[in-house]
Image (cartoon, rainbow, N blue to C red):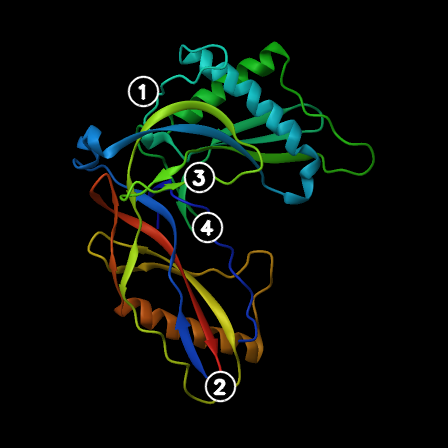
């Protein structure tokens, strides 16, 4: 399934099955709003907007390559300085992003692959849900495109470089330069960004966000049958809540950690039975849908379920 995304928050990491007969559902973790061309989103009033700083946050794809983080942070500062000039505000002042960049272009990433020999390539990260990429919607790539122009200029000027450590090291490093801003909810509460390195780039008028909230969800029953009472654990399911406040079941998938092998045999049967029970609970649940500036939108959420003995 493919859609265009405006990220709201970092996805929670799926936890491995662990010791904990009943089941409980904890509040969902909101992750991304699925943007669709909509007349409502094109006419959000100024009263629903708040000027917010936009930061460039470097993120290493491989966290074991932390040696490069400070260097990538320095590169991000160079690119930000260049983009400020493009936006007409040289020096330390933060330019207004509009009309070149609007809130639709936030939380997009410029991805970069840098080789030991100095060769590099970069691309604007596509939208996706799961493993299906989707072309970004118009108006959502301008900020990342500015970073791409700045990177090309820095390499031409010879100011962009990464240095490899002595001894064994990978031949390449891949990182994302992500555009992030604080979030303002519909009660004017501010959720700051959390990052080790964040370089301020510009100020953009951003609509207030109302994240998905659960209205009614029954805790799933512990699976019956020959497996009953034989296992405990935790399941995290990801799915889209649509504008009517129901789960789009075609988007549902379990968030098994990508760095861990799938369970097999009896343990795999336990896990599959937990997922089926949680799926049934989500299918019957109702939610208060997400809104951007008052406009209802579809949103990706992650819902944890814990199965434990009574």
Rendered location of residue 236, percent (x, y) = 45, 63
Mark with earlier residue (3, 4):
4
Mark with earlier residue (2, 3):
3
Mark with earlier residue (1, 4):
4
The residue where tag 3 is placed is 192
Rendered location of residue 228, percent (x, y) = 46, 87
User: For the residue labelled by badge 2, is the local secondary structure a helix, a strand or a loop?
Assistant: loop
* Picture residue at 56% right of the left edge, 25% below the top: 76
The residue where tag 2 is placed is 227
For residue 140, say whether it is visible: no
Q: CA distance from mark 2 to mark 4?
A: 31 Å
The residue where tag 1 is placed is 98
Eye-nearest disc, 3 or 4: 3
Rendered location of residue 11, percent (x, y) = 46, 50
In the rendered view, tell whether residue 119 sits above or below residue 237: above
28 sits to left or right of 214: right
The residue where tag 4 is placed is 11
Q: CA distance from mark 1 to mark 4?
A: 28 Å
């Amino acid at each position: 399934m493919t859609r265009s995304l405006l990220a709201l928050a970092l996805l929670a990491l799926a936890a491995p099955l662990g010791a904990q007969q009943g089941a409980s559902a904890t509040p969902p973790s909101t992750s991304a709003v699925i943007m669709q061309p909509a007349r409502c989103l094109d006419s959000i009033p100024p009263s629903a907007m708040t000027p917010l700083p936009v930061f460039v946050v470097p993120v290493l794809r491989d966290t074991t390559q932390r040696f490069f983080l400070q260097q990538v942070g320095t590169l991000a500062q160079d690119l930000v300085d260049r983009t400020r000039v493009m936006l007409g505000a040289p020096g330390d002042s933060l330019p207004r992003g509009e009309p070149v960049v609007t809130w639709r272009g936030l939380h997009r990433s410029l991805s970069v692959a840098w080789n030991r020999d100095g060769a590099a390539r970069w691309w604007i990260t596509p939208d996706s849900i799961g493993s299906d990429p989707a072309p970004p919607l118009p108006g959502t790539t301008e900020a990342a495109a500015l970073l791409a122009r700045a990177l090309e200029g820095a390499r031409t000027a010879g100011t962009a470089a990464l240095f490899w450590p002595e001894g064994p090291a990978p031949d390449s490093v891949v990182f994302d330069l992500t555009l992030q801003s604080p979030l303002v909810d519909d009660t004017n509460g501010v959720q700051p960004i959390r990052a080790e390195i964040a370089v301020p780039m510009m100020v953009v008028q951003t609509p207030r966000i109302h994240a998905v909230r659960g209205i009614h969800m029954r805790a799933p029953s512990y699976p019956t049958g020959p497996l009953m009472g034989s296992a405990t654990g935790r399941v995290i399911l990801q799915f889209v809540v649509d504008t009517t406040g129901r789960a789009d079941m075609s988007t549902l998938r379990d968030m098994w950690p990508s760095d861990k092998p799938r369970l097999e045999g009896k343990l795999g049967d336990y896990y599959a039975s937990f997922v089926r029970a949680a799926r049934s609970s989500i299918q019957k649940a109702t939610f208060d849908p997400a809104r951007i500036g008052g406009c209802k939108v579809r949103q990706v959420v992650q819902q944890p379920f814990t199965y434990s003995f009574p």
